[in-house]
Amino acid sequence: MWCSVSERVAVGVLASGSGTNLQALLDACEAPDFPARIAVVLSNRPKAFALERARRAGIPTEVVLRRDHPSRADWDAAAVSRLRAYGVQWVCLAGFMKIVTPTFLEGFPDHVLNIHPSLLPAFRGLHAQAQALAAGVRVAGCTVHLVDAGTDTGPIIIQGAVPVLQGDDEDALKARILSAEHRIFPLALRWAAEGRLSIVDGQLVVDLPPTEARWIWKG
Ligand code: GAR
């Protein structure tokens, strides 16, 4: 199936760092049948390489500096209004190293996705890969979840698992997890844009065809 630009769901990506997850989303959007398009990339860090990736892809960028806003909620309100100006329907937090407040979530209720480098609910917060190594787990991974008011607590959409190998240091494990992130984030965004995610009786329901559901298990 082919998706015209006007049919595609407009997505805003928030990123603070190098933006390899943003790149995975941009690459996914190249597919003619991908149901979403990146309408804008917004950062709190003017030098984030993610912004450069967006420019190279011809995507508009916005920078919202924390120091220009008296409170976190004010920053969030400004970010919501910038994203709305681009008609954004879904938001992806792709290495966005700032906690969003309820003000932001009220702007896009149940429409904010986050990628986190652990198999949640294990290892929430910062340095998830170092936490995994310190705990001695043999399987690590990543999670895309809907964002709620907690930190890395929202309903889980998809996870990718990778082994922890003997001799791994933080960088080696980060890189292995990152490659799994690049596979699952575009998939979660596809499902979101296809309308497969809904909240029923307070629970997230991911409505997948059986073949796609089996694919997750096979990895
Ligand atoms: C990724 O590993 C992402 O999961 C993590 O930051 C990295 C960003 O990489 N996010 C968090 O830790 C958020 N709690 P990227 O800039 O190359 O996409």
Image: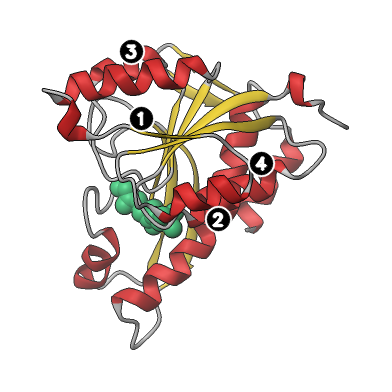
Q: Earlier in the sequence, mark 3 or mark 1?
A: 3
Q: Report the Cα–Cα distance between label 1 and label 4.
A: 22 Å
The residue carrying mark 1 is: 147
Q: Earlier in the sequence, mark 2 or mark 1?
A: 1
Of badges 3 and 1, the one in the foreground is: 3
Quadrant in which the C terminus appears: bottom right
- When asked about the image quadrant of residue 190, the answer is top right
Q: Earlier in the sequence, mark 2 or mark 3?
A: 3
Q: Report the Cα–Cα distance between label 2 and label 1.
A: 19 Å
Please say if the residues under marks 2 and 3 sit with CB atoms less than 8 Å apart.
no
Q: Report the Cα–Cα distance between label 3 and label 1.
A: 11 Å
Q: Amino acid at mark 2?
A: His
For image coordinates 65% across by 23% down, the residue present is 9
Left or right of 199: which side holds 71?
left
Q: Report the Cα–Cα distance between label 4 and label 3.
A: 30 Å
The residue carrying mark 4 is: 213
Q: Residues within 10 Å of mark 3 (few under 14, many from 20)?
A: few
Numbered badge on residue 182: 2
The residue carrying mark 3 is: 106
Where does the image place residue 8, in percent across and percent down from the top left?
71, 24
